[in-house]
Image (tube, grey):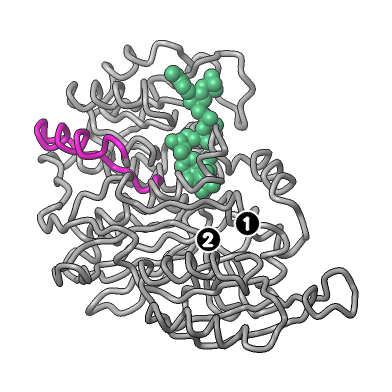
């Protein structure tokens, strides 16, 4: 029997995620109440437009445009509006008025997380954000709690569903980036402004959140090296297939030794990369996400599942709701985030990885040797070279014959690689540097 009073829940937003949160909560309210030991009463759902179409049936009388009044009457506030303002202001209001807060808003956390966590700690409230990374996949709690006794070395993951969906369609269906993006938007995966997905901002925000948790260090989104998928072409995807790779947008967060100082630091980066076709990340299709975590004692762990989508993400939000409501019933202050390690954030130049460089070169004797010399001058070791001859102008003329070289390197620093590529671009035997892609997962 439930003896505790009803907990008042305010939901901010009824879009792709919010409408599903509201509908699942109304549908399964009684079951969740039994799990919590208190009734969960939705006091209202804040929206901008009362008449906008919804992806789930929501009683009209619950919709409201005055978010502040809803917040002030709530025990728990669920923010699924997105954006920075007024979401930041609303969460601050909720925390200072004594409510616990649940958010799926990685953009807000990656930019204003530290100040919101500080307010939560000050007032003894808790901020829950399982849905902010990986959609339905439980990854925040495993890093925050389950692995809190271990030392995480590396996180390698696909954390943006939209770009994975797009790259997958380019790879398997021959779509262009634009065609695939239109489909992702239709399915509710993309952010309100899809440049957040395409240009890697969303993945960088998630990388900042994951790195902060994993390395007990505040990692701001500005500290994450970011490259999106806008420049990835269908030709590159096909060329990758031919050489046994798949192109994925990856987030890589590492605890590294800074080559300059010899001290430990944290690096976080987001960029398209080649993954061997047999690697488990290559088999992550559609809007799914997968995150590999490598920890000292636990070894390698993989978290996999739906990385975007309203209903899937609502599952993570409701998990947070059950945790927040249980804490309310039991009482006691929230548990603050741990940032005690405070490691320095290292620039991309400190990272070392493998690369694949595609060059258009003149097809003449001695060219390969000159190119190999350039690599060795910068200490970059070549692992493999594939050559295909292309005849430009179709004539007998030897000068007009060209070749494509695909060069795979051993592990090298970004600094050495950048210097090598600059010299290649200026070399008289190189017509063009066609592409430079990092290779992960080997
Ligand atoms: P949508 O754009 O679909 O929905 C946003 C909702 O918030 C709408 O109902 C909108 O109202 C409401 N809203 C926006 N601004 C205001 C405001 N100022 N006052 C009141 N209501 C407002 O977003 P999503 O549901 O896709 O995303 C919500 C959050 O969840 C974002 O932070 C996103 O990053 C995150 N997220 C999204 C996932 C997804 O797959 N979509 C997955 C994981 C996280 P109205 O309907 O009237 O316009
Ligand atoms: N736009 C985001 C994505 C939603 O595609 O991954 C989930 O965070």
| 49 w.r.t. 222: above or below | above
Quadrant hosting residue 425: bottom right
Number of numbered discs on residues: 2
Instruction: Pinpoint residue 55: horizontal percent, then vertical percent.
Output: 62, 32
Q: Is residue 23 visible?
A: no
Residue extent of the magenta highlight = 111-132
Report x, y in % for residue 107. Answer: 39, 38
- CB contact under 8 Å: marks 1 and 2: yes
**Which residue corresponds to the image point at 76% horizontal and 54% vertical from the top-left?**
175
**Mark positioned earlier in the residue sequence (1 or 2):** 1
Q: Is residue 340 left or right of residue 38?
A: left
Write down the residue under mark 2.
272
Q: Is mark 2 within 8 Å of ligand 2?
A: no
Mark 1: give few (<14), some (14-19) or many (20+) Cα within 10 Å: some
Asked whether residue 68 appears in the rendered view, the answer is yes
| Residue 130 is inside the magenta segment | yes
Q: Secondary structure at mark 1?
A: loop
Q: Nearer the viewer, residue 43 or 262?
A: 262
Q: State yes or no: residue 128 in magenta.
A: yes
**On the image, which quarter does residue 294 sit in?**
bottom left
> In what quadrant of the picture does the N terminus appear?
top left
Q: Which mark is residue 232?
A: 1
């Amino acid at each position: 029997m439930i003896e505790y009073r009803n907990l008042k829940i305010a939901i901010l937003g009824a879009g792709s995620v919010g409408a599903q949160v509201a509908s699942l909560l109304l549908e399964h309210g009684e079951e969740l109440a039994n799990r919590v030991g208190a009734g969960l009463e939705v006091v209202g759902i804040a929206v901008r437009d009362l008449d906008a179409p919804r992806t789930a049936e929501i009683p009209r009388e619950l919709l409201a445009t005055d978010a502040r009044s809803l917040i002030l009457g709530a025990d728990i506030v669920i923010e699924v509006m997105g954006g920075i303002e007024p979401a930041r202001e609303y969460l601050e209001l909720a925390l200072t008025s004594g409510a616990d807060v649940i958010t799926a808003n990685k953009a807000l956390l990656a930019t204003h997380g530290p100040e919101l966590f500080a307010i939560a700690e000050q007032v003894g409230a808790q901020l829950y954000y399982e849905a902010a990374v990986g959609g339905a996949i439980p990854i925040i709690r495993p890093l925050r709690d389950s692995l809190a006794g271990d030392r995480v070395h590396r996180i390698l993951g696909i954390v943006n569903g939209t770009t994975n969906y797009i790259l997958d369609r380019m790879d398997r269906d021959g779509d262009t980036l634009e065609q695939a993006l239109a489909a992702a938007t239709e399915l509710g995966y993309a952010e309100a402004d899809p440049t957040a997905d395409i240009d890697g901002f969303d993945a960088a925000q998630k990388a900042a959140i994951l790195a902060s948790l994993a390395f007990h260090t505040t990692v701001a989104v500005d500290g994450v090296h970011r490259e999106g998928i806008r420049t990835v072409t269908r030709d590159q995807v096909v060329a990758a297939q031919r050489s046994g790779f798949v192109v994925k947008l990856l987030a890589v967060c590492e605890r590294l030794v800074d080559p300059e100082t010899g001290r430990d630091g944290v690096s976080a980066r987001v960029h398209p990369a080649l993954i061997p076709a047999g690697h488990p990340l290559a088999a992550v299709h559609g809007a799914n996400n997968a995150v590999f975590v490598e920890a000292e004692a636990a070894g390698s762990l993989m978290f996999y599942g739906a990385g975007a989508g309203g209903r899937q993400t609502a599952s993570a939000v409701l998990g947070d709701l059950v945790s927040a409501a249980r804490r309310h019933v039991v009482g006691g202050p929230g548990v603050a985030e741990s940032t005690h390690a405070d490691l320095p954030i290292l620039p991309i130049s400190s990272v070392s990885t493998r690369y694949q460089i595609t060059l258009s070169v003149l097809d003449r004797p001695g060219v390969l040797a000159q190119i190999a010399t350039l690599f060795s001058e910068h200490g970059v070791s070549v692992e493999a070279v594939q050559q295909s001859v292309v005849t430009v102008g179709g004539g007998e003329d030897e000068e007009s014959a060209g070749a494509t070289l695909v060069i795979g390197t051993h592990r090298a620093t970004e600094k050495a690689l950048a210097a090598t590529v600059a010299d290649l671009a200026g070399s008289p035997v190189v017509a063009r540097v066609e592409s430079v892609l990092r290779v992960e997962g080997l």
